Structure formats: structure tokens, C-alpha cells
Amino acid sequence: MKQSYLNLVGLAFRAGKCSLGEETILKDIRSKQLKLLIIAEDAAPNTIKKFTDKCTFYDIPFVIGDNRDTLSQAIGKEGRVAVGVKDSGFAKKIVSMVEQTNRG
């Protein structure tokens, strides 16, 4: 699950199509503005549960991505455990890349 999808996450962030920070992400989930949530695999179990429960309830797709350092590096911000993608085009492509990597 390496570079390809992370490059796209970085591009989406630079295009202003991402949400960062727990409160902002939860607000965007509730308002259904998020099209995809990427959660770091090494996030705290309570954090993962909170995000996945919210996404499931509001029918927002989510993926468990790389660790927090790799995810943070992709967007150029430190210590990020989740990145919300607001653009459906970016979201669909990222999901297909992650699924393809998991298969292969």
C-alpha cells in the first residue's frame, strides 16, 4: 500500500480537498461532506473506533492506511492520524488504489 495512493492524498491536500483534525473531520462526517476517511493503522484503538463508528453510521467510506508518520509525510503535516477527503474523484481513485495494492 505504498507511494501511489499517498501521492494522490498529498495532491488532494494541496488542492484544498482534505479535512484535518478530529473535530473538523467529525463535523464533515456529520454534514456528509467527506467522501472518504483515511485512518492511520497505528492510531489509538479508541480513535479508530470513534471514526469507524461515525463513518459507518453516516455511510462514509473509510480505509485503514499506512502509519501516522507516512500519512503525515504525504500531506506535509506532522502527527496526523486521519485525513478526510472531500472530493469524490480523489476518493474513488484512492479507494481503487488501496484495494488494488491490498489484492496484489
Image (cartoon, grey):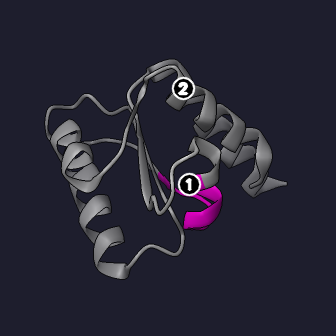
Front residue (pair 46, 14):
14
Above or below, 35 against 43 in this view is above
Query: So how many labels did they put on this image?
Result: 2
The quadrant where residue 54 appears: bottom left
Indicate the position of residue 25 as horizontal and vertical percent values. Answer: 27, 45
Image quadrant in which the C terminus is located = bottom right
Chain-order first, disc 2 or disc 1: 2
The residue shown at (38%, 32%) is 35
As shown in the figure, which amino acid type bears the numbered disc 2?
Arg
Kindly state the secondary structure of the residue where label 1 is placed: helix
Residue holding disc 1:
72
Q: In the rendered view, would you say 17 is above or below 71? A: above
88 with respect to 6 (left or right): left
Image point 59% across, 39% down: which residue? Answer: 95
Task: Give the labeled residue for mark 2.
Answer: 14
User: Can you say which quadrant of the picture contains the N terminus?
Assistant: bottom right
Element at label 2: helix
Q: Residues within 10 Å of mark 1 (few under 14, many from 20)?
A: many
Q: Residue at x 51, y 31 (%)?
A: 13
- Amino acid type of the residue tagged 1 in the rendering: Ser
Q: Residues within 10 Å of mark 2 (few under 14, many from 20)?
A: few
Residue span colored magenta: 63-72
